[in-house]
Image (spheres, helix red, strand yellow):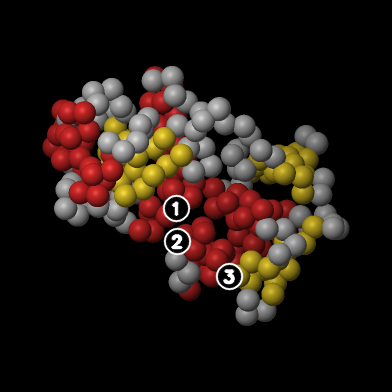
Amino acid sequence: MAKSKIFYVEDDATLAFLTVDYLEQFYDITHFSDGAEAVKNFHKDNYDLCILDVMLPKKDGFEIAQEIRNANAEIPILFLSAKSLKEDRIKGLKLGADDFLVKPFSLEELSLKIEVFLKRSSKAPIVIQKSYEIGSFLFFPNDYCLTRNAEKVNLTERESALLKLFLDNKNEILKRERILTALWGDDDYFMGRSLDVFISRLRKIFKEENSVRIENIPRIGFKLVME
């Protein structure tokens, strides 16, 4: 089944990278960083849903929405904004937006809203839950949890993302900078300290698994070893 096509306009490079990286698991997502470029390209494909940042260079999200609505009265439109002003919400809804999500938001919440809007237009993707075997554990990245017999270990979103990144690159060295950029979009010192905490927690979870270990590669990064 073909993936639903998402039209995404966001000028914040870090947020756009993280959002696209997450959503492209389920959707065919096309990203634009400025309003004029986005409007120029909207008519070149048949999209199923639009995600528009409000504050954009050249043309803002409201102007883009107006042009989209003039061409397509049915396509769902979701606004993203750093503002929570009532006036902005009302303006967006009057332009025909389906919802208004205030930054910062969780990617899970965004994904759930997308699914709701696509279901209304019968375009919802069939998402198959992929699981991973890690020693005696089963890992379900979409549910942020590990299970072993009747035991369940809940993970945070970033712990789950980190573990999935390790599993997708098992027995390979992952540079510290690559991990930080994938999880946070940056590799500064404070995020590095958070990464150390997450790895420590994962090591505790798997401490009884003789075939699983996370190795520290000095001055380079880490490696998930599975034997």
Q: Which residue is mark 1?
A: 18
* Residue 175 located left or right of residue 171: left
Q: Amino acid at mark 2?
A: Gly
Residue at the spot x=62%, y=32% of the render? 128
Q: Quadrant of residue 115?
A: top left
Q: Position of residue 149 (x, y in %)?
A: 80, 36
Q: Look at the image and tell me whether residue 121 can be seen.
A: yes
Q: Which residue is mark 3?
A: 176
Q: Decide: is 72 above or below 164.
A: above
Between disc 1 and disc 2, whose residue precedes? 1
Disc 1 vs disc 2: Cβ atoms closer than 8 Å? yes
Q: CA distance from mark 1 to mark 2?
A: 7 Å
Q: Amino acid at mark 1?
A: Leu
Q: Decide: is 48 above or below 190.
A: above
* Residue 119 located left or right of residue 87: right
Between disc 2 and disc 3, whose residue precedes? 3
Q: Look at the image and tell me whether residue 193 can be seen.
A: no
Local crowd at mark 2 within 10 Å, few (<14), some, or many (≥20)? some
Disc 2 vs disc 3: Cβ atoms closer than 8 Å? no
Q: Amino acid at mark 3?
A: Arg
Q: Quadrant of residue 80?
A: top left
Residue at the spot x=39%, y=58% of the render? 14
* The C terminus - image quarter: bottom right
Q: Secondary structure at mark 1?
A: helix
* Residue 154 located left or right of residue 40: right
Q: Nearer the viewer, residue 157 or 1?
A: 1
Q: Which residue is mark 2?
A: 185
Q: Position of residue 92 (x, y in %)?
A: 19, 34
